[in-house]
Amino acid sequence: MTGARFTDGAAVDFDIGVDPAGLADEDLFRELASLYRTRLDTLRYGPDAALENHFRRTAELETEYMARFPGREVTPDRLTQAF
């Protein structure tokens, strides 16, 4: 981490964000919701660097989510016949 500082006990690199492994579950959900909320605007209007950062951050946070919740709930209404 190049520009790392500590905020509330978590290491924060202000160039890339908080390490997902250091986030509480509630904070992880909040970060994911924020990314999903801004996704379309970033895709449509953001510069390449912003889109690249969005891809990277989404992958980091979703990977952490799947590591924490491998047996996550799957709503039967969301399934198609193919699954």
Image (spheres, rainbow, N blue to C red):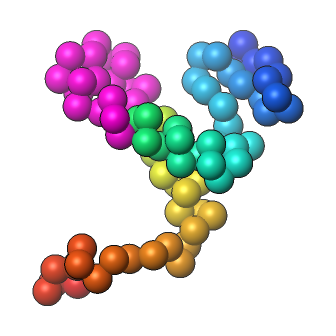
Looking at the picture, how far across and down is residue 27, in whole percent? 62, 42
Residue 61 location (% of width, % of height) = 53, 46
Q: Is residue 15 magenta?
A: no
Examine the image and state in which quarter residue 53 appears.
top left
- Give the magenta range: 36-55
Identify the main secondary structure in magenta: helix
Left or right: where 64 falls relative to 54: right
Task: Look at the picture and state if 82 lies above or below 6.
Answer: below
Q: Residue at x 85, y 32 (%)?
A: 9
- Residue 1 quadrant: top right
**Residue at image coords 53%, 41%:** 30
Please identify the quarter of the rendering in which residue 74 is found: bottom left
| Residue extending furthest toward the left | 81
Who's the residue at 24% across and 73% down the image? Answer: 78
Res 32 seen here: yes
Residue 36 percent location from the top left of the image: 35, 40
Residue 26 drawn above or below residue 10? below
Q: Quadrant of the C terminus?
A: bottom left
List the single residue furthest toward the right. Answer: 9
Q: Is residue 47 magenta?
A: yes
Residue found 52% across the figure and 38% down from its top: 31
Side (left or right) of 81 relative to 61 = left
Q: Position of residue 63 (x, y in %)?
A: 52, 54
Q: Is residue 26 left or right of residue 30?
A: right
Residue in the foreground of this view, choosing between 42 and 26: 26
Question: Quick check: can you spot residue 1?
Answer: no
Q: Is 64 left, or right, of 34 in this rendering?
A: right
